[in-house]
Protein backbone atom coordinates (compact mmCIF):
# COMPACT_ATOMS: atom_id res chain seq x y z
CA UNK A 1 0.00 0.00 0.00
CA UNK A 2 1.62 3.20 -1.14
CA UNK A 3 1.56 6.14 1.21
CA UNK A 4 3.85 8.58 -0.53
CA UNK A 5 2.36 11.55 -2.35
CA UNK A 6 3.17 12.68 -5.84
CA UNK A 7 3.28 16.47 -5.87
CA UNK A 8 3.33 18.73 -8.85
CA UNK A 9 3.37 22.42 -8.07
CA UNK A 10 3.34 25.47 -10.25
CA UNK A 11 0.92 27.25 -12.51
CA UNK A 12 -1.69 25.19 -14.32
CA UNK A 13 -3.81 26.38 -17.23
CA UNK A 14 -4.72 29.85 -18.34
CA UNK A 15 -7.36 32.39 -17.45
CA UNK A 16 -10.08 33.52 -19.81
CA UNK A 17 -11.97 36.76 -19.24
CA UNK A 18 -15.11 36.09 -21.24
CA UNK A 19 -16.56 39.52 -20.67
CA UNK A 20 -13.54 41.28 -22.09
CA UNK A 21 -13.29 38.71 -24.86
CA UNK A 22 -9.50 38.48 -24.56
CA UNK A 23 -7.73 35.61 -22.73
CA UNK A 24 -5.03 36.38 -20.23
CA UNK A 25 -2.01 34.27 -19.40
CA UNK A 26 -0.72 33.82 -15.87
CA UNK A 27 2.81 33.17 -14.65
CA UNK A 28 4.01 32.12 -18.08
CA UNK A 29 1.09 29.82 -18.89
CA UNK A 30 0.04 29.79 -22.52
CA UNK A 31 -3.15 31.74 -23.15
CA UNK A 32 -5.89 29.80 -24.90
CA UNK A 33 -8.06 31.02 -27.72
CA UNK A 34 -11.17 32.82 -26.55
CA UNK A 35 -13.54 30.37 -28.21
CA UNK A 36 -15.60 29.34 -25.20
CA UNK A 37 -19.07 30.77 -25.61
CA UNK A 38 -21.29 31.71 -22.71
CA UNK A 39 -24.96 32.51 -22.83
CA UNK A 40 -27.25 34.17 -20.33
CA UNK A 41 -30.76 32.82 -20.58
CA UNK A 42 -34.03 32.94 -18.77
CA UNK A 43 -35.83 29.95 -17.32
CA UNK A 44 -36.92 28.74 -20.76
CA UNK A 45 -33.39 28.24 -22.06
CA UNK A 46 -33.87 31.05 -24.60
CA UNK A 47 -32.04 34.40 -24.51
CA UNK A 48 -33.38 36.70 -21.81
CA UNK A 49 -35.87 39.17 -23.25
CA UNK A 50 -36.60 42.61 -21.90
CA UNK A 51 -39.87 41.33 -20.48
CA UNK A 52 -40.64 38.22 -18.43
CA UNK A 53 -40.87 35.23 -20.73
CA UNK A 54 -44.08 33.87 -19.30
CA UNK A 55 -45.81 36.89 -17.83
CA UNK A 56 -44.86 39.80 -20.03
CA UNK A 57 -43.86 41.80 -16.97
CA UNK A 58 -40.82 44.06 -17.07
CA UNK A 59 -37.51 42.56 -16.09
CA UNK A 60 -36.72 43.06 -12.42
CA UNK A 61 -34.30 45.78 -11.44
CA UNK A 62 -31.79 43.20 -10.27
CA UNK A 63 -31.51 41.80 -13.76
CA UNK A 64 -33.65 38.73 -13.10
CA UNK A 65 -36.56 37.58 -15.20
CA UNK A 66 -40.14 37.85 -13.97
CA UNK A 67 -42.28 34.73 -13.87
CA UNK A 68 -41.65 30.99 -14.37
CA UNK A 69 -40.62 29.52 -17.67
CA UNK A 70 -42.59 26.64 -19.23
CA UNK A 71 -40.30 24.05 -17.67
CA UNK A 72 -41.02 25.24 -14.11
CA UNK A 73 -43.77 23.49 -12.21
CA UNK A 74 -45.76 24.47 -9.17
CA UNK A 75 -45.62 22.24 -6.10
CA UNK A 76 -47.44 18.95 -6.74
CA UNK A 77 -47.82 19.61 -10.45
CA UNK A 78 -46.26 16.31 -11.41
CA UNK A 79 -47.72 14.02 -8.79
CA UNK A 80 -45.02 14.46 -6.19
CA UNK A 81 -45.84 12.96 -2.83
CA UNK A 82 -44.50 13.23 0.69
CA UNK A 83 -44.64 10.16 2.90
CA UNK A 84 -43.97 10.29 6.60
CA UNK A 85 -42.34 7.35 8.33
CA UNK A 86 -42.68 6.60 12.01
CA UNK A 87 -39.90 7.94 14.22
CA UNK A 88 -37.51 5.33 15.49
CA UNK A 89 -37.79 5.92 19.24
CA UNK A 90 -35.72 3.75 21.52
CA UNK A 91 -34.62 1.61 18.57
CA UNK A 92 -31.27 0.20 17.66
CA UNK A 93 -29.97 3.50 16.33
CA UNK A 94 -28.91 4.99 19.64
CA UNK A 95 -25.25 5.91 19.52
CA UNK A 96 -22.96 7.35 22.15
CA UNK A 97 -20.82 9.96 20.45
CA UNK A 98 -19.89 13.59 20.24
CA UNK A 99 -22.09 16.43 19.10
CA UNK A 100 -22.88 16.56 15.38
CA UNK A 101 -23.35 19.61 13.23
CA UNK A 102 -21.23 22.06 11.29
CA UNK A 103 -21.00 25.78 10.81
CA UNK A 104 -23.01 27.07 7.87
CA UNK A 105 -21.46 29.64 5.56
CA UNK A 106 -23.23 33.00 5.69
CA UNK A 107 -25.43 33.76 2.67
CA UNK A 108 -24.18 36.42 0.29
CA UNK A 109 -25.76 39.07 -1.87
CA UNK A 110 -26.96 38.51 -5.40
CA UNK A 111 -29.69 36.40 -6.95
CA UNK A 112 -29.15 36.94 -10.66
CA UNK A 113 -26.10 36.72 -12.88
CA UNK A 114 -24.76 39.97 -14.28
CA UNK A 115 -23.10 39.61 -17.66
CA UNK A 116 -22.00 43.24 -17.57
CA UNK A 117 -19.31 42.36 -15.01
CA UNK A 118 -16.28 40.19 -15.63
CA UNK A 119 -16.76 36.44 -15.78
CA UNK A 120 -13.45 34.59 -15.66
CA UNK A 121 -12.88 30.91 -16.30
CA UNK A 122 -9.88 28.65 -16.39
CA UNK A 123 -9.05 25.05 -17.26
CA UNK A 124 -6.41 23.29 -15.15
CA UNK A 125 -4.63 21.40 -17.90
CA UNK A 126 -1.61 19.96 -16.14
CA UNK A 127 -3.11 16.47 -15.88
CA UNK A 128 -6.30 14.69 -16.82
CA UNK A 129 -8.58 14.76 -13.78
CA UNK A 130 -12.28 14.87 -12.98
CA UNK A 131 -13.43 17.40 -10.37
CA UNK A 132 -16.12 16.48 -7.82
CA UNK A 133 -16.13 19.03 -5.00
CA UNK A 134 -14.49 22.26 -3.84
CA UNK A 135 -14.02 24.31 -0.67
CA UNK A 136 -12.59 27.76 0.01
CA UNK A 137 -10.02 28.28 2.74
CA UNK A 138 -10.96 30.67 5.53
CA UNK A 139 -7.24 31.33 6.06
CA UNK A 140 -6.17 32.74 2.69
CA UNK A 141 -9.15 32.31 0.33
CA UNK A 142 -7.56 29.53 -1.75
CA UNK A 143 -9.96 27.19 -3.53
CA UNK A 144 -9.23 23.48 -3.08
CA UNK A 145 -10.69 21.05 -5.61
CA UNK A 146 -10.88 17.28 -5.26
CA UNK A 147 -11.37 14.55 -7.81
CA UNK A 148 -9.54 11.63 -9.34
CA UNK A 149 -6.65 11.26 -11.77
CA UNK A 150 -4.39 8.66 -13.31
CA UNK A 151 -1.15 8.30 -11.32
CA UNK A 152 2.19 7.78 -13.05
CA UNK A 153 2.11 4.08 -12.12
CA UNK A 154 -1.29 3.59 -13.78
CA UNK A 155 -3.46 3.60 -10.67
CA UNK A 156 -6.47 5.84 -10.27
CA UNK A 157 -5.95 8.05 -7.22
CA UNK A 158 -7.20 11.05 -5.29
CA UNK A 159 -6.39 14.40 -6.92
CA UNK A 160 -6.22 17.73 -5.10
CA UNK A 161 -5.86 21.03 -6.90
CA UNK A 162 -5.37 24.41 -5.24
CA UNK A 163 -6.04 27.73 -6.95
CA UNK A 164 -5.36 31.15 -5.45
CA UNK A 165 -8.41 32.67 -7.10
CA UNK A 166 -9.43 32.01 -10.69
CA UNK A 167 -6.47 34.01 -12.02
CA UNK A 168 -3.98 33.10 -9.31
CA UNK A 169 -1.25 30.51 -9.00
CA UNK A 170 -2.40 26.89 -9.15
CA UNK A 171 -0.86 23.62 -8.05
CA UNK A 172 -1.93 19.98 -7.99
CA UNK A 173 -1.12 16.86 -6.01
CA UNK A 174 -2.10 13.21 -6.35
CA UNK A 175 -2.52 10.91 -3.34
CA UNK A 176 -1.96 7.25 -4.28
CA UNK A 177 -3.43 4.60 -1.99
CA UNK A 178 -4.97 1.57 -3.69
CA UNK A 179 -5.63 0.50 -7.28
CA UNK A 180 -8.71 2.60 -7.97
CA UNK A 181 -9.50 5.60 -5.73
CA UNK A 182 -11.98 8.40 -6.44
CA UNK A 183 -12.27 11.49 -4.18
CA UNK A 184 -15.87 12.65 -3.81
CA UNK A 185 -16.10 15.37 -1.13
CA UNK A 186 -14.13 17.93 0.89
CA UNK A 187 -14.35 19.66 4.26
CA UNK A 188 -12.12 22.48 5.57
CA UNK A 189 -9.51 22.43 8.33
CA UNK A 190 -8.78 25.51 10.45
CA UNK A 191 -5.11 25.70 9.45
CA UNK A 192 -5.93 25.89 5.75
CA UNK A 193 -5.71 22.18 5.06
CA UNK A 194 -8.56 19.92 3.98
CA UNK A 195 -10.22 16.59 4.67
CA UNK A 196 -10.93 14.71 1.45
CA UNK A 197 -13.06 11.56 1.40
CA UNK A 198 -13.81 9.09 -1.34
CA UNK A 199 -13.95 5.50 -2.42
CA UNK A 200 -11.04 3.09 -2.60
CA UNK A 201 -10.97 -0.28 -4.33
CA UNK A 202 -8.19 -2.79 -4.95
CA UNK A 203 -9.72 -3.57 -8.37
CA UNK A 204 -11.04 -1.36 -11.14
CA UNK A 205 -14.21 -3.42 -11.35
CA UNK A 206 -15.39 -1.86 -8.08
CA UNK A 207 -16.60 -5.25 -6.83
CA UNK A 208 -15.22 -4.31 -3.42
CA UNK A 209 -14.86 -0.83 -1.99
CA UNK A 210 -13.79 0.91 1.21
CA UNK A 211 -14.12 4.53 2.26
CA UNK A 212 -10.84 6.45 2.36
CA UNK A 213 -10.46 9.71 4.32
CA UNK A 214 -7.31 11.83 4.09
CA UNK A 215 -6.41 14.96 6.05
CA UNK A 216 -3.90 17.28 4.40
CA UNK A 217 -1.76 20.10 5.71
CA UNK A 218 -2.07 23.63 4.36
CA UNK A 219 0.73 22.87 1.87
CA UNK A 220 -1.10 19.80 0.56
CA UNK A 221 0.99 17.13 2.26
CA UNK A 222 -0.84 14.19 3.80
CA UNK A 223 -1.13 14.43 7.60
CA UNK A 224 -3.32 11.42 8.37
CA UNK A 225 -5.52 8.89 6.62
CA UNK A 226 -8.17 6.41 7.71
CA UNK A 227 -9.76 3.52 5.84
CA UNK A 228 -13.31 2.55 6.75
CA UNK A 229 -13.66 -1.10 5.77
CA UNK A 230 -17.24 -1.39 6.94
CA UNK A 231 -18.20 -4.56 5.14
CA UNK A 232 -18.00 -6.23 1.80
CA UNK A 233 -18.78 -2.89 0.18
CA UNK A 234 -18.83 0.72 1.41
CA UNK A 235 -18.68 4.07 -0.32
CA UNK A 236 -19.19 7.73 0.53
CA UNK A 237 -20.70 10.83 -1.05
CA UNK A 238 -20.40 13.56 1.60
CA UNK A 239 -18.42 14.96 4.52
CA UNK A 240 -18.99 17.92 6.84
CA UNK A 241 -16.97 19.38 9.66
CA UNK A 242 -18.70 19.10 13.03
CA UNK A 243 -18.82 21.65 15.83
CA UNK A 244 -16.40 19.70 17.98
CA UNK A 245 -13.72 19.90 15.28
CA UNK A 246 -14.28 16.37 14.00
CA UNK A 247 -15.97 15.18 10.82
CA UNK A 248 -19.08 13.31 9.74
CA UNK A 249 -18.89 11.15 6.60
CA UNK A 250 -21.97 9.81 4.80
CA UNK A 251 -22.58 7.19 2.12
CA UNK A 252 -23.74 3.58 1.94
CA UNK A 253 -22.63 0.12 3.05
CA UNK A 254 -23.51 -3.51 2.40
CA UNK A 255 -22.81 -5.77 5.41
CA UNK A 256 -20.72 -8.93 5.02
CA UNK A 257 -22.84 -11.65 3.48
CA UNK A 258 -25.64 -9.20 2.72
CA UNK A 259 -27.06 -7.91 -0.53
CA UNK A 260 -28.90 -4.73 0.47
CA UNK A 261 -27.33 -1.30 0.74
CA UNK A 262 -27.99 0.69 3.94
CA UNK A 263 -27.39 4.38 4.49
CA UNK A 264 -24.16 4.79 6.46
CA UNK A 265 -22.48 7.56 8.49
CA UNK A 266 -19.23 7.65 10.45
CA UNK A 267 -18.13 10.20 13.04
CA UNK A 268 -14.43 10.96 13.43
CA UNK A 269 -12.23 13.17 15.57
CA UNK A 270 -10.08 15.96 14.12
CA UNK A 271 -7.33 13.50 13.11
CA UNK A 272 -9.87 11.16 11.40
CA UNK A 273 -9.88 8.61 14.19
CA UNK A 274 -13.24 6.85 14.20
CA UNK A 275 -15.58 7.79 17.05
CA UNK A 276 -18.57 5.75 15.92
CA UNK A 277 -20.45 4.67 12.80
CA UNK A 278 -24.05 3.68 12.14
CA UNK A 279 -26.25 2.32 9.37
CA UNK A 280 -29.87 3.23 8.65
CA UNK A 281 -32.05 0.88 6.63
CA UNK A 282 -35.43 1.39 5.03
CA UNK A 283 -35.54 -0.58 1.78
CA UNK A 284 -33.17 -2.51 -0.46
CA UNK A 285 -31.08 0.45 -1.60
CA UNK A 286 -30.48 3.27 0.90
CA UNK A 287 -27.68 5.83 0.76
CA UNK A 288 -26.62 9.22 2.17
CA UNK A 289 -25.84 11.70 -0.60
CA UNK A 290 -25.56 14.96 1.39
CA UNK A 291 -25.46 16.18 5.00
CA UNK A 292 -26.85 19.46 6.36
CA UNK A 293 -26.53 20.76 9.89
CA UNK A 294 -29.65 21.23 12.02
CA UNK A 295 -30.21 24.24 14.29
CA UNK A 296 -30.49 21.96 17.34
CA UNK A 297 -27.00 20.49 16.87
CA UNK A 298 -28.06 17.36 15.02
CA UNK A 299 -27.90 16.81 11.27
CA UNK A 300 -30.24 16.09 8.39
CA UNK A 301 -29.10 13.18 6.25
CA UNK A 302 -30.34 13.59 2.69
CA UNK A 303 -30.14 10.43 0.64
CA UNK A 304 -31.96 7.94 -1.53
CA UNK A 305 -34.20 4.97 -0.95
CA UNK A 306 -35.22 2.51 -3.64
CA UNK A 307 -38.43 1.07 -2.20
CA UNK A 308 -40.77 1.00 -5.23
CA UNK A 309 -39.28 4.16 -6.80
CA UNK A 310 -35.99 5.89 -6.20
CA UNK A 311 -37.13 8.63 -3.80
CA UNK A 312 -35.31 11.23 -1.75
CA UNK A 313 -34.99 10.03 1.84
CA UNK A 314 -34.61 12.53 4.69
CA UNK A 315 -33.37 11.27 8.06
CA UNK A 316 -33.09 13.68 11.00
CA UNK A 317 -30.47 12.50 13.50
CA UNK A 318 -29.88 14.03 16.93
CA UNK A 319 -26.52 14.83 18.51
CA UNK A 320 -26.05 11.18 19.53
CA UNK A 321 -26.93 9.74 16.16
CA UNK A 322 -30.44 8.65 17.11
CA UNK A 323 -33.07 8.90 14.42
CA UNK A 324 -35.79 11.42 15.32
CA UNK A 325 -37.84 11.23 12.14
CA UNK A 326 -37.58 10.35 8.50
CA UNK A 327 -39.52 11.35 5.38
CA UNK A 328 -39.52 10.42 1.71
CA UNK A 329 -40.15 12.81 -1.15
CA UNK A 330 -40.76 11.30 -4.54
CA UNK A 331 -43.05 10.83 -7.51
CA UNK A 332 -43.60 8.21 -10.15
CA UNK A 333 -40.05 8.35 -11.52
CA UNK A 334 -36.45 8.64 -10.41
CA UNK A 335 -35.81 11.36 -7.83
CA UNK A 336 -32.32 12.18 -6.55
CA UNK A 337 -30.92 14.86 -4.21
CA UNK A 338 -27.20 15.52 -4.67
CA UNK A 339 -26.63 18.52 -2.36
CA UNK A 340 -28.31 19.94 0.75
CA UNK A 341 -27.89 22.99 2.97
CA UNK A 342 -29.45 24.46 6.10
CA UNK A 343 -31.27 27.73 5.37
CA UNK A 344 -31.47 30.94 7.36
CA UNK A 345 -35.14 30.40 8.24
CA UNK A 346 -34.32 27.20 10.16
CA UNK A 347 -35.27 24.85 7.34
CA UNK A 348 -33.35 23.13 4.57
CA UNK A 349 -32.95 23.13 0.79
CA UNK A 350 -31.71 20.46 -1.58
CA UNK A 351 -30.82 20.24 -5.27
CA UNK A 352 -30.74 17.29 -7.63
CA UNK A 353 -32.81 15.97 -10.52
CA UNK A 354 -36.09 14.17 -11.17
CA UNK A 355 -37.92 12.27 -13.89
CA UNK A 356 -41.26 12.22 -12.05
CA UNK A 357 -44.11 13.48 -14.20
CA UNK A 358 -41.69 14.51 -16.92
CA UNK A 359 -40.07 13.31 -20.13
CA UNK A 360 -36.40 13.17 -19.27
CA UNK A 361 -34.33 14.42 -16.36
CA UNK A 362 -34.95 17.89 -14.97
CA UNK A 363 -32.87 19.91 -12.54
CA UNK A 364 -34.78 20.04 -9.26
CA UNK A 365 -34.60 22.28 -6.21
CA UNK A 366 -36.81 22.05 -3.12
CA UNK A 367 -37.08 23.73 0.28
CA UNK A 368 -38.22 22.11 3.53
CA UNK A 369 -39.31 23.40 6.90
CA UNK A 370 -37.55 22.39 10.14
CA UNK A 371 -39.68 19.24 10.38
CA UNK A 372 -38.75 18.12 6.87
CA UNK A 373 -42.10 18.98 5.30
CA UNK A 374 -41.94 20.18 1.71
CA UNK A 375 -42.36 23.96 1.36
CA UNK A 376 -41.98 24.24 -2.42
CA UNK A 377 -40.20 22.53 -5.29
CA UNK A 378 -39.36 23.56 -8.84
CA UNK A 379 -37.81 21.90 -11.88
CA UNK A 380 -35.91 23.17 -14.90
CA UNK A 381 -34.81 21.60 -18.18
CA UNK A 382 -32.84 23.04 -21.06
CA UNK A 383 -32.34 20.57 -23.93
CA UNK A 384 -32.58 16.83 -23.46
CA UNK A 385 -31.85 16.84 -19.74
CA UNK A 386 -30.66 19.08 -16.90
CA UNK A 387 -29.06 18.06 -13.60
CA UNK A 388 -28.43 20.20 -10.50
CA UNK A 389 -25.32 19.25 -8.51
CA UNK A 390 -24.90 21.95 -5.84
CA UNK A 391 -26.52 25.08 -4.38
CA UNK A 392 -25.80 28.01 -2.05
CA UNK A 393 -28.18 30.42 -0.32
CA UNK A 394 -28.16 34.11 -1.24
CA UNK A 395 -30.03 37.03 0.29
CA UNK A 396 -32.64 36.72 -2.47
CA UNK A 397 -32.88 32.97 -2.84
CA UNK A 398 -30.45 30.38 -4.15
CA UNK A 399 -27.74 29.91 -6.76
CA UNK A 400 -27.59 26.46 -8.35
CA UNK A 401 -24.79 24.77 -10.33
CA UNK A 402 -25.28 21.86 -12.71
CA UNK A 403 -25.23 20.68 -16.31
CA UNK A 404 -27.56 20.49 -19.31
CA UNK A 405 -27.32 18.14 -22.29
CA UNK A 406 -28.48 19.14 -25.77
CA UNK A 407 -29.93 17.04 -28.57
CA UNK A 408 -26.39 16.51 -29.92
CA UNK A 409 -25.38 14.79 -26.67
CA UNK A 410 -23.03 17.56 -25.65
CA UNK A 411 -23.17 18.72 -22.03
CA UNK A 412 -22.65 22.31 -20.82
CA UNK A 413 -22.19 23.58 -17.29
CA UNK A 414 -24.70 26.10 -15.98
CA UNK A 415 -25.27 28.40 -13.02
CA UNK A 416 -28.87 29.45 -12.31
CA UNK A 417 -30.61 31.55 -9.70
CA UNK A 418 -33.90 30.85 -7.94
CA UNK A 419 -35.79 33.32 -5.76
CA UNK A 420 -37.29 32.55 -2.35
CA UNK A 421 -40.63 31.47 -3.78
CA UNK A 422 -39.07 29.10 -6.28
CA UNK A 423 -39.06 31.13 -9.48
CA UNK A 424 -36.15 30.28 -11.77
CA UNK A 425 -34.72 33.71 -12.53
CA UNK A 426 -31.71 33.44 -14.77
CA UNK A 427 -29.19 30.96 -16.10
CA UNK A 428 -25.68 31.27 -17.49
CA UNK A 429 -24.19 28.41 -19.49
CA UNK A 430 -20.53 27.65 -20.24
CA UNK A 431 -19.61 25.85 -23.44
CA UNK A 432 -16.12 25.12 -22.18
CA UNK A 433 -17.25 22.99 -19.23
CA UNK A 434 -19.37 19.85 -19.39
CA UNK A 435 -20.47 20.00 -15.76
CA UNK A 436 -20.49 22.38 -12.77
CA UNK A 437 -20.17 20.25 -9.64
CA UNK A 438 -19.65 22.80 -6.86
CA UNK A 439 -20.57 26.43 -6.22
CA UNK A 440 -18.96 28.60 -3.54
CA UNK A 441 -19.44 32.17 -2.35
CA UNK A 442 -16.65 34.73 -2.16
CA UNK A 443 -16.32 37.77 0.12
CA UNK A 444 -17.12 40.25 -2.67
CA UNK A 445 -20.38 38.46 -3.48
CA UNK A 446 -19.11 36.50 -6.47
CA UNK A 447 -19.79 32.84 -7.07
CA UNK A 448 -16.85 30.51 -7.70
CA UNK A 449 -17.96 27.51 -9.74
CA UNK A 450 -15.91 24.34 -10.14
CA UNK A 451 -16.49 21.53 -12.60
CA UNK A 452 -15.02 19.46 -15.40
CA UNK A 453 -14.36 19.94 -19.09
CA UNK A 454 -14.73 16.98 -21.41
CA UNK A 455 -12.59 17.22 -24.55
CA UNK A 456 -13.83 15.18 -27.49
CA UNK A 457 -17.32 14.44 -26.16
CA UNK A 458 -18.74 12.38 -23.26
CA UNK A 459 -15.88 9.85 -23.28
CA UNK A 460 -13.10 12.35 -23.91
CA UNK A 461 -10.36 13.40 -21.52
CA UNK A 462 -11.47 15.41 -18.48
CA UNK A 463 -9.83 18.46 -16.91
CA UNK A 464 -10.87 20.49 -13.85
CA UNK A 465 -12.46 23.85 -14.65
CA UNK A 466 -13.05 26.89 -12.43
CA UNK A 467 -15.03 30.07 -13.11
CA UNK A 468 -15.84 33.27 -11.24
CA UNK A 469 -19.34 34.66 -11.83
CA UNK A 470 -20.55 38.04 -10.57
CA UNK A 471 -24.04 38.53 -9.12
CA UNK A 472 -26.27 41.40 -10.24
CA UNK A 473 -25.21 45.02 -9.83
CA UNK A 474 -28.73 46.42 -10.16
CA UNK A 475 -28.63 46.91 -13.93
CA UNK A 476 -31.08 44.95 -16.13
CA UNK A 477 -29.65 42.07 -18.11
CA UNK A 478 -29.01 42.90 -21.77
CA UNK A 479 -30.98 40.83 -24.28
CA UNK A 480 -29.29 37.96 -26.11
CA UNK A 481 -26.22 35.85 -25.65
CA UNK A 482 -22.94 37.21 -24.37
Image (cartoon, rainbow, N blue to C red):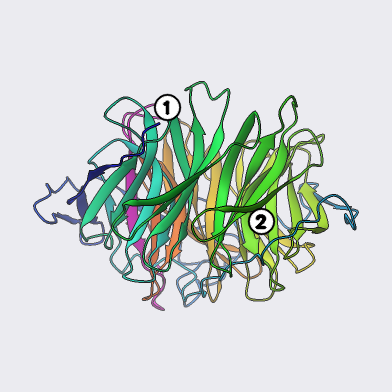
Q: What range is drawn magenta here?
A: 454-477
92 horizontally vs 270: left or right: right
- Residue 279 position within the rendered picture, expressed as x and y whole percent measured from the top left: 73, 45
Image quarter of the N terminus: top left
226 horizontally vs 145: left or right: right
Q: Which residue bears the numbered disc 2?
A: 378
Q: Is residue 39 above or below residue 189?
A: above
- Can I make out residue 414 in this image? no
Residue 25 location, quadrant:
bottom left
Q: Residue at x 45, y 62 (%)?
A: 188
Q: Residue at x 68, y 52 (%)?
A: 302
Q: Which residue bears the numbered disc 1?
A: 179
Task: Report the front residue among 406 and 256.
Answer: 256
Residue 320 location, quadrant:
bottom right
Task: Report the front residue among 411 and 188.
Answer: 188
- Can I make out residue 335 in this image? yes
Image quarter of the C terminus: bottom left
| Structural crowding at the residue carrying mark 2, measured as other residues with C-alpha within 10 Å and reported as few (<14), some (14–19) or many (≥20) | many
User: Tag 2's secondary structure?
Assistant: strand
Q: In 3D space, how far apart are the residues under numbered discs 2 and 1 (Cα atoms)?
A: 41 Å
Q: Residue at x 35, y 71 (%)?
A: 139
Q: Is residue 475 magenta?
A: yes
- Residue 265 position within the rendered picture, expressed as x and y whole percent measured from the top left: 66, 49
User: Tag 1's secondary structure?
Assistant: loop
- Residue 351 position within the rendered picture, expressed as x and y whole percent measured from the top left: 60, 54
Amino acid sequence: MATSDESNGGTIGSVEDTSAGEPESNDGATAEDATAAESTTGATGEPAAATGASTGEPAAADGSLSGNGPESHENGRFGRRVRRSRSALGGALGVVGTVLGAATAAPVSGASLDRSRTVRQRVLEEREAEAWDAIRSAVDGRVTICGSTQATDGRRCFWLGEVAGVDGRASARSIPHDEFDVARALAPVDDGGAVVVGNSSPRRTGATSDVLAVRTEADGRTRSRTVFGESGYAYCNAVIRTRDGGYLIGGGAIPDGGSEMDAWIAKTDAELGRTWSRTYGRSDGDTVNAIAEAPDGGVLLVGSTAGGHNDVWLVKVDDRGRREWDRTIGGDGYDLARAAIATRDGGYAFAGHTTSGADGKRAWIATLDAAGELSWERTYRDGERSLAHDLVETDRGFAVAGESTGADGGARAFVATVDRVGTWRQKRTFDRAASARSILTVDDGRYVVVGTTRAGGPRGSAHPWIASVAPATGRPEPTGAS
